[in-house]
Image: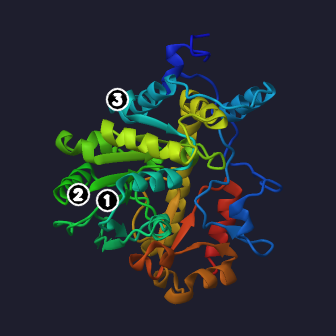
Amino acid sequence: MTDDGFQRTADTLRNPSAVRGAPGPAFDTPFDRTGTGSSKWTRAKAPGVIPMGLADMDLPGPPAVAEALERRARHRAYGYTVCDPAGRTLVADWYRARHGVAVDPDWVLLLPCGPRTALRLLLDTLHPQAPVLFPTPEWGGFTQLCRAAGIDQRELRLPLGPDGYRLPDGPLPRPTAAVLLSSPHNPSARVWPATELRALAERAAEADALLVSDEVHGDLTHPGHVHPVAVTTVDPAVRHRTVTLNSVGKTFNCSGIPSSFALVPDPALRARLTDTLAGYGLWEGGLLEQTVQQAALREGGPWLDALLAHLAAARDRLTEHLGPAVRSAPQASYLLWLDAAALGLPPATARRALLERCGLEASDGADFGPGGSGALRLNYALPGPVLDTVLARLDRL
């Protein structure tokens, strides 16, 4: 034990690539979520419907996380918990091992809340009088957050080319308080090229704006692609105007235990965010949050490698099956962005038509802003037998 009361593990376990052992349950066997209160399956209003709308995997999470929770639960002290300072180094080690980049542990804030709440708290630190800007189509949570906070928002259409979306060119409107970006892109699962990300950060700095990169799908980058971590990719001259948000929730399928971490290179902004957290009665750490984060980052690497192989195979099967209906080839995560008209569905009512014809529930592209009109988003993080059923049902179109 150390002076701060935390049990330390060997340094080798901080590098997930050094962890040995089987990745855990196979992803090609049925996974029953009955009785778990699943939000995703609640969306399946009728028997036999396969819900593919919510970004939540129907796959078993890492055994290491389950074992860590069971172990901690057996110690019946569930009181206030301080932040384990080694957690910051653990996050930095993860970025070095998985992404090959150097993150200063001092940049890391370990947050006892989900990324959406973290983003709202970050916006609170800005007290924005100027609008917040984000490209579209884009995850609808940005719009919801801005509306709830009473912040003016403006959207930029993402150009769509033969290789998928690209970030918009040209100067940003002034004034702009912040530019919000999902990276990789949600809904299309495109990995933004580092050159485009650097250019956007420079344009944000020119507009006196903060670039906030929501990278909760970043660890799910498919083999053959490299995720550019915003705070280490941008020019060092604008790093103080850049924030990366991430979480183990999407990566390790444990979003039901809200936690996240923010990479904030600017000390003054870190201090303001810490003060804002305290104002809401939140502090770094958290009992279950730390338990899940540390188990996932220390021991989840082999499980994640197996997951990525499964997702890449599922992606290939679906994109080959659907062909030109795929608006942008996915390079990360488990999201497929489809053109409704190319599927033979009426663009205005595509979600309902897919549900009625195929028994598949999807996300409506209109939920992702004006740029999502006439599109559908499908989540293909499914066990092999369920994916077989999905492909057979799509033949009805």
Amino acid under disc 3? Asp
Q: Where is residue 368 shown, x and y percent of the image?
A: 46, 72
Contact? badges 2 and 1 (CB < 8 Å): yes
Q: Nearer the viewer, residue 27 or 256?
A: 256
Q: Residue at x 23, y 57 (%)?
A: 204
Amino acid under disc 2? Ala
Residue under label 2, please give it.
204
325 in relation to 269, above or below: below
- Residue 178 disc label: 1
- Residue 360 disc label: none
Give SS at disc 3. Answer: loop
| Residue 228 visible in this rendered orientation of the protein | no
Q: Where is residue 244 shown, x and y percent of the image?
A: 38, 46
- The image quadrant that residue 166 belongs to is bottom left
Q: Earlier in the sequence, mark 3 or mark 2?
A: 3
Residue under label 3, please give it.
104
Amino acid under disc 1? Ala
Contact? badges 3 and 2 (CB < 8 Å): no
- Local crowd at mark 1 within 10 Å, few (<14), some, or many (≥20)? many
- The image quadrant that residue 239 belongs to is top left
3D distance between C-alphas at marks 3 and 2: 23 Å
| Residue 180 visible in this rendered orientation of the protein | yes
84 in relation to 389, above or below: above
Q: Where is residue 125 shown, x and y percent of the image?
A: 39, 51
Image position of 383 (left or right of 211): right
Q: Residue at x 56, y 87 (%)?
A: 349
Q: Residue at x 83, y 55 (%)?
A: 35
Q: Earlier in the sequence, mark 3 or mark 1?
A: 3
Q: Residue at x 46, y 28 (%)?
A: 88
Q: Earlier in the sequence, mark 2 or mark 1?
A: 1
Q: Where is residue 57 shown, x and y percent of the image?
A: 63, 53
